[in-house]
Image (spheres, rainbow, N blue to C red):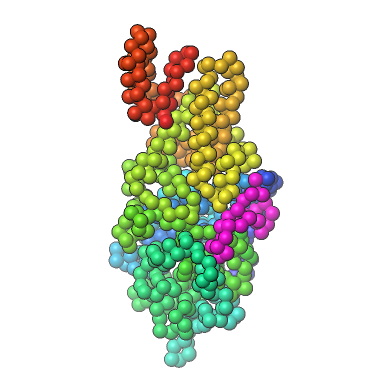
């Protein structure tokens, strides 16, 4: 049953960049991140110089992804992108839970094979990630592909005296195996259940709003796993490492082990797969705030009880809320990704999902999408105008090649401050305002070549900052999305921009004629009407130009 192979180091075995020298930016000296276990923001130091290992809990592929699921994916995609911009080699592991009670029950109710249902919705999640510009993980392991890893890990826990096998009246193993919480004095350290001196407001909010996404059942220690309500447990806190099958479970959803036929408990897969792909200890374990307890508390306990170090730092993204209530299917407030994308461009949806710092609750509303669309209009307008003024865009290789040390200092400071996306976005729009001012001066200044150089430098900075957030409109997937998701490169106009240009040019010509006839009241009326529509007019020696506010 056991695996003779040691866990792989994916930085040296499959990553294309494994032979590339590491050039970590000096900006790393200021990187500070929150740690759920310590309840503190502290300076980040990787376990291995120049490398970062991240494990993020992925989807349980029981049904279609909703905005609440994808918010976590976008949040940790931004974290990952910042590490990459800082020059680190990043091994990013995101699992797929493709076997659990909800998948089995929903497949049975729909007359489906459980593995077919899981694979169908796994593809839906992948499509959502790709559409919203989430980088593919270094490796994306499925639970069903790692049964031997889980069995080996459970055996280590048993051998170390921190678990027990339930037997029947004849002394034969039933397939139920539990973690013995009482044997592990460190239980509760992640969520500070033994401490009352400090208050973590994010954790308090999580406790008030419930222990888990789509929770069912009354057992707070494992609310989605019926095995944990078993009378066979020695302690209410004990949780299932392995569990006997239900009578309704199909034969191909059962695996033979030394402790009986069954399938994994809720938590064991993440411990097994994080160790398989990241080895003994790794830098960051991420996931949604709802997984903090019991999933991550149990995961930390069983990993360490097996004799392996746990993650050095735990990071949790907050929920998407709708009218102040956590978005989840059980509350009936879930918004599927396809339905949201049917009415909004993917860029706009990504911007809205990543518009606040990962630890902040994100209130989802029509207004949030309106603001995201306005942000897109400002960004794309500046990039297009700058591209026209320069006769083309800097190549993508130049944009991606900019180091964190060469980005605006206020952007770097915000990203180093526990990935403060709100501050980083403010820095982007400050730079865009400066760029628009330069563009308005281009026709008026004799040293136009010097101004063009400043415009190019500003354009590069804006696009590099946007790229760090996964939002450069001239990158994939936005370019392939066309007018629905990307900006023009400045050499060709989108149909929308061409129509807007024609309409506004007509108004500017009418205003110019009015000024020529000294009908200043009409000229001012045209300017004010355009201003009310969100269009700013800049008057110069060679005529008037416009931009979106």
- Residue 310 x %, y %: 59, 67
Q: Is residue 478 left or right of residue 390?
A: left
* Front one among 280 and 144: 280
Q: Is residue 484 visible?
A: yes
Q: Quadrant of residue 350?
A: top left
- Residue 123 x %, y %: 41, 53
**Figure check: 432 above or below 53:** above
Q: Which residues are magenta?
A: 27-53
In this figure, what is the number of numbered marks? 0
Residue at image point 42% right, 31% down: 549
The stretch drawn in magenta includes residue 49: yes
Residue at image point 32% right, 61% down: 331
**Figure check: 380 above or below 149:** above
Residue at image point 35% right, 19% down: 524
Q: Residue furthest bottom?
A: 170
Tell me the quadrant of the picture where the N terminus can be found.
bottom right
- Residue 186 x %, y %: 57, 75
* Front one among 3 and 396: 396
Q: Quadrant of residue 279?
A: bottom right
* Front one among 463 and 171: 463
- Residue 344 x %, y %: 36, 41
**Figure check: 211 above or below 81:** below
Q: Is residue 38 left or right of residue 513?
A: right
């Amino acid at each position: 049953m056991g695996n003779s192979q040691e866990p792989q180091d994916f930085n040296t075995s499959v990553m294309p960049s494994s032979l590339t020298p590491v050039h970590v930016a000096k900006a790393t000296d200021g990187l500070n991140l929150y740690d759920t276990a310590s309840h503190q923001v502290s300076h980040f130091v990787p376990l291995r110089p120049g490398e970062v290992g991240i494990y993020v809990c992925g989807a349980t592929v029981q049904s279609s992804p909703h905005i609440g699921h994808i918010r976590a994916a976008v949040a940790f995609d931004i974290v990952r992108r910042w590490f990459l911009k800082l020059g680190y080699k990043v091994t990013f592991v995101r699992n797929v839970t493709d076997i659990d009670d909800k998948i089995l029950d929903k497949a049975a109710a729909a007359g489906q094979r459980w593995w077919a249902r899981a694979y169908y919705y796994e593809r839906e999640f992948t499509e959502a990630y790709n559409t919203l510009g989430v980088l593919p993980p270094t490796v994306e392991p499925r639970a069903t592909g790692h049964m031997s890893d889980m069995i080996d890990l459970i055996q280590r826990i048993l051998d170390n005296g921190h678990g027990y096998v339930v037997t029947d009246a004849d002394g034969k193993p039933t397939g139920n195996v539990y973690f013995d919480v009482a044997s592990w004095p460190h239980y509760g350290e992640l969520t500070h259940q033994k401490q009352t001196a400090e208050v973590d407001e994010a954790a308090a909010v999580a406790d008030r709003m419930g222990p888990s996404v789509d929770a069912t059942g009354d057992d707070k220690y494992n609310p989605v796993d019926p095995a944990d309500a078993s009378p066979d447990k020695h302690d209410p806190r004990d949780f299932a490492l392995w569990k006997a099958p239900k009578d309704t479970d199909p034969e191909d959803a059962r695996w033979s082990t030394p402790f009986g036929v069954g399938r994994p408990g809720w938590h064991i897969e993440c411990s097994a797969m994080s160790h398989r792909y990241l080895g003994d200890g790794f830098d960051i374990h991420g996931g949604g705030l709802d997984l903090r307890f019991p999933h991550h508390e149990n995961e930390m306990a069983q990993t360490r009880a097996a004799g392996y170090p746990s993650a050095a730092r735990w990071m949790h993204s907050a929920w998407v809320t709708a009218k102040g209530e956590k978005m989840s299917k059980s509350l009936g407030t879930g918004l599927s990704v396809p339905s949201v994308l049917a009415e909004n461009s993917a860029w706009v949806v990504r911007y809205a999902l990543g518009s606040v710092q990962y630890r902040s609750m994100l209130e989802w509303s029509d207004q949030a999408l309106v603001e995201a669309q306005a942000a897109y209009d400002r960004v794309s307008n500046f990039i297009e105008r700058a591209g026209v003024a320069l006769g083309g865009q800097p190549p993508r290789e130049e944009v991606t090649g900019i180091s964190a040390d060469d980005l605006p200092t206020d952007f770097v400071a915000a990203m180093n401050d526990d990935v403060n996306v709100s501050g980083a976005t403010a820095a982007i729009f400050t730079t865009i305002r400066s760029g628009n001012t330069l563009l308005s001066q281009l026709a008026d200044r004799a040293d136009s070549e010097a101004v063009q150089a400043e415009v190019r430098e500003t354009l590069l900075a804006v696009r590099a900052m946007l790229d760090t957030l996964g939002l450069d409109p001239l990158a994939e997937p936005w370019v392939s999305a066309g007018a629905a998701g990307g900006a023009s490169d400045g050499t060709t106009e989108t149909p929308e921009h061409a129509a807007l240009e024609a309409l506004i040019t007509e108004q500017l010509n009418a205003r110019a004629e009015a000024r020529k006839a000294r009908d200043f009241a009409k000229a001012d009326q045209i300017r004010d009407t355009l201003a009310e529509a969100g269009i700013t007019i800049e008057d110069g020696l060679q005529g008037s130009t416009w931009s979106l506010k």
